[in-house]
Amino acid sequence: MNAHAHRVAGQRLPRLDGIGKVTGKHVYAADFTLPGMLFGKVLRSHRAHALIRKLDISRAAEIPGVRGIITSADIPAVRFGQAVRDTSVFALDRVLFVGHPIAAVAATSLEIAEQAIAAIDVEFDDLPALFDPEAALDSNIRIHPDWESYKALPIIARSGNISGRARIHAGDVDAAFASAHRVYEHRFTTPLVHPGYTEPRAAVADWDANSNVTVWSNTQLPFDTQNTLAEILDLPAARVRVIVPGIGGGFGGKLRIGVEHFAALLARKTARPVKVMTTSEEELTSAYPRQATVVSLKTAVDREGRLLAREGRIIVDCGAFAGSGPGTAAISLQIMVGPYKTPALALEGIAVYTNKVPSGSFRAPAGPMANFAVESQMDMIAKDLGIDPLEIRLRNIVKEGDLGPSGEIHKSVSIEECLRKAADAIGWEHRNPEPGRGKGIACSWWMTTGGSSGVYVKINPDGTATLVSGAVEIGSGAITGAAQVLAEELSLDLTDINVAGVDTQTAPFDYGAQGSRTAFSVGNACLAAASDLRRQMFDLAARQLDSQVDTMVLRDKHVVAGSKSISIAELARISRLSGGGLIAHGTAISPSPAYDPTRLENHPLPAWNSPSYHAHAVDLSVDPETGSVSINRYVVAQDVGFAINPTYIEGQIEGGVAQGIGQALSEEIVYRDGTVMNANLTDYKMPTAQDVPDVECILVECASAAGPYGAKGVGEPPCIQPPAAINNAIAAATGFWLRSLPMTAEKIAEQLRAGRT
Amino acid sequence: MTRTNLDIVVNGERHQILIEPHWTLLHVLRNVIGMMGTKENCLEAECGVCTVLLDGKSVNSCILLAGQVAGRSVTTIEGLGNPEHLHPLQAAFIECGAVQCGYCIPGMILTAKSFLDENPGRRPSRDEIREAIAGTLCRCTGYRKIVDAVALAAERMSVAGSNP
């Protein structure tokens, strides 16, 4: 849109960490080693719900090379957790899921640590277990018998196995249902899915002579990890230093403490550096997958397909600990409304404990699950009323100034443009080009998470700038994007920006690589720092050039005042000798939009900052015999506000769609009686290069008021719509919709056979 | 445990080291020789991030015992090019925006190199490239820009008439 007005922002420039990554020089946490380092392993439960009758480490401790073993008896009795403090480092008197940590060993080699783990003697008394989230809602079995004693955020409503319950209500739902032309009720289910980052979670911990600990880890949230470690270790946070050397993907799975605490506790026990890294089996049994859900929708429409009311309930299976479950259940409600006007709402999100893996915040928490339900049902309604699926959406979408589900005002709305562009690109007028082939469409909206960001920017004596941020470059290119903003504002080239490593001891606070916020928030902080640096440079230049500040501009790496100029490099050298150098602290925080609190109950994320709008369209074929789906084309029209670097925004969309296709068609952590049946990367089926088409991206730029140059969050949305868009295309091809993810060939073939008989 | 001698060439340099019989080539590369460009993940030849070239052909170093490669020549990502002189594949991956987190990229590039070396002077189709790299999982990119990069490198290498 306004890329032509910028030299650096908006340009397809190569990322700053690219050369290091293609040459093998880039160091990831998994690559990090220290001299004398020990290797840690975690003993994990093989029982889903059981009392620990006996835990004997004596045989393991005698194995040569074992340097330390810890259990819950050796560490402070601390419960931690994001919304509910229900989690302990190790199981206390009981295990709550297969994979629950019981003890950890540090040894001189990984093999010895594994032998020691096998030599720990544990005996259990099994307890009745809960695996079905709906059964857990009102079961007499208590997964956390002491749940009432746990601390929790005041906003979180809990009872029994329910770790959080949120509601949104508006209008008169009963009256709307009573007077509706039609009412539709459907139930959908979605499974546990793993974020699938290629670098396992890894951490190395080392204690110094003053009893401070440093942890090198691939966390997405170094400051959150610092705080959680401080609680677990019973130390002030300032004595815990977290450094992120590099991170091989996260997608929300590396937000919360994973192995850092084991490394730190083992390092304290052994007085040696300790490294802990997960295996694929641990990843698929005891990491932080996306929650399985059950979504029920009851929707009332008028004769023209206009939405009148919606009742909805999502049950979020959070596993053995609440994790992000309460938040996910709450955010689901905004997704269950979608980018549509619905006058009457009665929506409820419930997070419930089961004896399964504790879950987390995989990319767009709640997004794919609730959108699968809402957008599939939208097409079912359209078909029943004889309305085109695109048309029914256009009749219901929000316009500028409409109220959102929390009573907030929709601003910078682009959903119609997204829908029309996606439909045009896929060739919507020919929805069934041949038998067994169909096209589907789905749309949604999503927040740009706020949260504060700080950066330090220092001008070096060669005129380059160093950017110090606590935000992790997770792979999205967001830090390159923020650096483009900084370079733009300082009249530098992108290659003039040096990005310092992430270190909680030296970097200003950042809310972290989560919530589609990094380029947005760090970019805003860079704008603020650049503004301060311009003032500093202009003040200095005023004395050097004998000119007035108000005549000055920054141009081509110089401060220019009329016919006089001085280079940024020269100013930096002068400042080093006379004033300690040119350095600025830029900060950013996105204010929460106004909303109507009477519509909400126990909702921790009531109104969305700078939301984005997007539509996906897919053209696919269904094999009439096997039921397997092959995707012919996939189009995304996404409102990004302003494309700071179109190449990496496309990368986010293409990669997000690939993850969404996995969730739609093949990915599921399969449990049987509390045990994961497919804890390896052959049986947990992530899309390969042969499963994903060349995703076509249409970048819509409807500027936000709050983002740098109008940018909106980009990273999470692309994985929201694929399940619904694909389901709707399957229905166009076959005449039926699936009600549960993943939509495997087996499920489709079964329906095809049922249709023939 | 009894250690035995291993004589291998890694990126043109000869190494004479002592190994335990169960050590994998991946373990030797990362933890004995100290070359961390070869990545570690599933350890079961399912993800492909540990791919290296053994006498020019791509292999999963996580399931090859180090003893099996005695006397043979291994190429890792560090041996392909360096920041001053990037291999055409490395340059194309940057140029096409095919790198995000980057953890699969060394394995992906070496898989692509093995494939292009088997098809000298030819410009493979996108489907052929997809099939060739399907054994290496990338969770960031959705593969489109990786296919773009391999196609671009293949084009340049076929024009140059030589495969560095």
Image: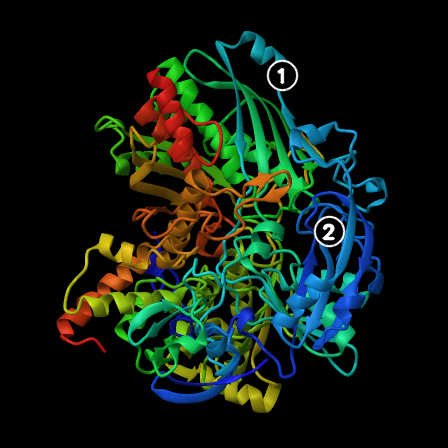
Residue A81: assigned label: 2
Same chain assignment for discs 2 and 1? yes
Q: Residue furthest front?
A: B2
Name the chain letter of the residue that bears numbered label 2: A
Residue type beneath disc 2:
Gly
Check the image and report above or below for A434 versus B152.
above
Say whether residue A25 is visible: no
For residue A261, side relative to residue B131 (left or right): right
Residue sitting at 82 percent across and 45 percent down?
A150
Q: Is residue A470 depicted above or below B14 in this figure?
A: above
Q: Secondary structure at mark 1?
A: loop
Q: Chain of mark 1?
A: A
Query: Which residue position is annotated with label 1?
Result: A172
Q: Is residue A725 above or below residue A150?
A: above
Secondary structure under tag 2 reads: loop
User: Which residue is at the front of the view, A135 or A380?
Assistant: A135
Residue A76 visible here: yes
**Amino acid type for the residue under numbered disc 1:** Asp
- Which badge, 2 or 1, comes first in the chain's sequence? 2
Q: CA distance from mark 2 to mark 1?
A: 37 Å
Question: Quadrant location of residue B114?
Answer: bottom left
- Rendered location of residue B104, percent (x, y): 42, 64
Asked whether A402 or A372 is in front, the reply is A372
Q: Where the C terminus of chain A falls, by quadrant?
A: top left
